[in-house]
Image: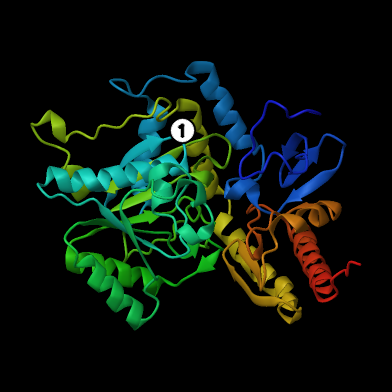
Amino acid sequence: MTCIDSLWLPYTQMATAPAPLPVVAASGVRIRLADGRELIDGISSWWTMCHGYRHPHIMQAVAAQLDTLPHVMFAGLVHEPALTLARRLAALLPGNLERVFFSESGSVAVEVALKMAVQYWKNRGQDRRRFVAFRDGYHGDTLGALSVTDPGCGFHAALAGYRVPQIFAQLPREAEARAALDALLANPDIAAVIVEPRVQGAGGMRFHDVDTLRAIRACCDEHGVLMIADEIMTGFGRTGTLFASPPDAVPDILCLSKALTGGTLPLAATVAADHVFAAFCSERAEDAFMHGPTFMANPLACAAANASLDLFESEPRLAQVAAIEAQMRRELEPCRALPGVVDVRAIGAIGVVQLDRPVAANLRPAFVERGVWVRPFGDIVYLAPPFVIDAADLTMLTTAIRAVVAQSAAEASCPISTP
């Protein structure tokens, strides 16, 4: 891997970016580079590797499935790995979220949810096409998902004007914002509200409490509007509970991906409540939901997901997450005293140091030099490690953050002058 001439990398200005690091293997919480160095993965490969890389139980399940059925179309045909996974998800999710529609990525799961919401109302004889989303929210890079992503997050510039109709609001953390949301939802063309429960991920790892979700649920109930929960990042233990949506603020539609397969294979799910599904069941063919990804419910991915759920049942994942949260709170707190740090926070297996300036790419090489893979973005340096990380490796991550943030603060206070 010495040449990337044929590749087009994500979120990268290919004309100026440094060469990416060649990876040859990964195991547990470590990524091995082609030059022999190993990096402790502090962000779980974009928040997917909750059990670490190459967990033997997941690897065995995928290998066994490969021997029998690697893939088959999911239209007119069905297979046991998907049936089993759908039943297990329905049993684990709160409320009556019981109808599982599979796809291949988080962005597509959101697209499916948006289409589902619009057609739900159409099937009921109402023309509702607009969505309410929240400032600092991020829901994916495909066109519909991008449309309900806050333009201030920096993903919109090249596609201004090509968006699904939407309204952006402040999260209803306080009475004034709750009143504003209530007024918005009185609009008769609102199809749904979409929210990332407890943590707004790519918008800056911003936290909110369950009372905020309860307020959204109450406003949706008051005006008969659907609520969509984007748990692509928060699902499967990342915030300290198996799902971030609380039992008293259950959404009508919920999106899952990332850690669904333990990060092993691409898979996503859009899960609808019974009353949403009922709107698509009739004698009219046109009421059917017209969506069908080619690799929908891929058997290998479903086998990986079932094995991942086995691990949540048999290994102490949520206890590990609680320990990670406590350690990150303790070991990142000294950053609060550093110049330029405006906040230090943690929830579950997410730890954040927020600065008063953009930090992103210029800090990444400093982390590699310290033997860790940490990828700051915007004004935050954050951790989202695999749940199986041990205390010593987590200390290496937090120590690296303290050192790099301190170095960055020192450099910011002593700018290099030019003649």
Q: Nearer the viewer, residue 159 or 332?
A: 159
In this rendering, position of residue 69 left or right of residue 342: left
**Callout 1 secondary element:** helix
x and y percent of residue 194 in the render? 35, 57
As shown in the figure, which amino acid type bears the numbered disc 1? Cys
Q: Which residue is drawn at the image coordinates 88% and 70% (left, top)?
A: 417
x and y percent of residue 286 in the render? 14, 31
Q: Is residue 153 visible?
A: yes
Report which residue position mark 1 lands on.
302
Q: Across the whole image, how many numbered discs are drawn on residues? A: 1
Q: Which residue is drawn at the image coordinates 33% and 48% (left, top)?
A: 164
x and y percent of residue 27 in the render? 73, 40
Q: Is residue 201 visible?
A: no
Callout 1 crowding tier (Cα within 10 Å): few <14, some 14–19, many ≥20? many
Q: Say if 414 sits above or below 362 in the image.
A: below
Q: Say if 37 sits above or below 290 in the image.
A: below
Q: Nearer the viewer, residue 101 or 359?
A: 359
Q: Nearer the viewer, residue 11 or 283?
A: 11
In this rendering, position of residue 59 left or right of residue 41: left
- Quarter holding residue 192: bottom left
In which quadrant of the rendered image does the N terminus lie? top right
x and y percent of residue 178 in the render? 31, 76
- Quarter holding residue 216: bottom left
